[in-house]
Image: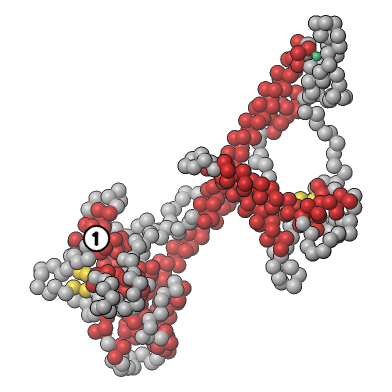
Amino acid sequence: MTRSRQARPYPTRTITPPRRTRDGGISPAWLLMQAAQLSWEIRNILLLINGMRLNLSEELHIHSESSDMLINAAHATAIMEARLPLAPAWGNGRPRSRSIFAQAREAGTDPADVRPDLAMVHPPIDPQFIHDVDAALRDDPDPNAQCAGTTLKKERCAKTIVTGIGSAHCSAHLTPAERQRRDTLRAAQDRQMQAIHDALEDQRTALAVNWIDRYGRRPHRLELPSPPSRPRQVFPFDDDAGLTLGEDDQAMLALYDTGWPALCPRSAEIIGALLDCPRGTTADLAEIAAIQTPERWSSGEQWLESSVWDGIRPPELPLPAAGEAPELDEHPSIQVLRRHLHDDHHAWERWNTGFATLVEACDDPPVDTMAELLAFWQDIGILASHDSTADEPLWALQPSLPSPWRVMYARGRHVQPHVLAGALDHLLANDVPLDPDLPPREVFNLIIAPKGESAHGTDLATRDTVSVSS
Ligand SMILES: [Zn+2]
């Protein structure tokens, strides 16, 4: 309990190795520090979630040991990076971290002179708590001094004094004034411990939020439902295999293969409706899509009129600009939040612009609502109606779906070259699967081909392959 008032002769230096070595190679010291940092974070995440769903005490125990070892290794690498004096290495090969510490001590180096650049600082607490403890603490000339009190047998008490309160007695022989000082100190220490405990909890919660940001972010893109499971057989039409897929399942797999679902916003909802109802009118599909998320839509009409960016466009947070609210700017999370908002908005804007260009390059009117998105899918031939007799056409996935490349090839010649170029950029940026029958070069050639030439020149260009809109 005695405090060491002895100040270190040199302040501890924080060592941050460069990410790359001088010759451009990877920096093992930097990577080791990242590993130690991550390990420390994992420990804190485990501490936070222990007992929530599982008892993780065993995992915590083992991980804490390895985490301590990694932090030590990072410390050892900091000693080496700082080129602190070390005794000559003994043995062959690379030293273990504990031998670095031993070599440092042997050379008279204090390993505590440096520390690795790890962001595992103790969370800040109100300085008043520390001040109260400091105010209640008294120095003990000899913390192991014998109690000055006497026992009932009139003998000198053999116990050692209570430390930290300038007492001359053990806990049994405290004077009323000493007892008062001990209680004051204990209360101040308890308050400080509680403050540290609360601050650690807050720190772990912030860490968990940060992790969800780092590892669990789906940038407002609605998840696509899983496609029908693919049979292992390479040829689904092989009669002998007996593993043929239904026509609708095959069409669904083909749709995923084209890359259209990832290019179009909210295609997850249309696909969800088609999985439930492979053949339906526009109203049927809208009704089913609306039912899938009743908390969002009260009717199919409402779903049809909703924006294609509903739920995808990042929310506008009324956050004051940097500098407007200085007390807010001081909060470290605000900067992170501002950056995330900016990144999310930027990602959405890119998608928005790319999709609009794609629609324009398909020679189609702008798509703003789900009704217009369904019409777009019908026009480019993703959805086809086979039932010409019914009043309302029953839409289903076309058995042979046109790839985005094919649609571009068929329709790109009708639009401005810069629009086609923008749409092709969007396809490349989204890693749209290539069309095995149509090399991208053919499509790119359209950009430089003279306008109006060979509009009906090749089989590939005929609009029949991508269905003619009604
Ligand atoms: Zn005593």
The quadrant in which residue 92 appears is bottom right
Name the residue at 85% across, 48% down.
Answer: 110
Name the residue at 49% across, 55% down.
Answer: 216
* SS type, badge 1: helix
The quadrant in which residue 172 appears is top right
Coloring applied to the structure: secondary structure
Amino acid residing under circle 1: Asp
Name of the residue lying farthest toward the front: 240
Say if 147 sits above or below 126 in the image: above
Residue density around tag 1, few if under 14, some if 14–19, many if 20 or more, within 10 Å: few
Q: Is mark 1 within 8 Å of ligand 1?
A: no
Is 429 positioned to the left or the right of 90 in the image?
left
Tell me how many marks there are: 1
Is 306 positioned to the left or the right of 135 in the image?
left
Name the residue at 31% across, 88% down.
Answer: 460
Q: Which residue is mark 1?
A: 276
Q: Nearer the viewer, residue 105 or 332?
A: 105
Residue 369 on image: x %, y %: 29, 63
Name of the residue lying farthest toward the top: 153
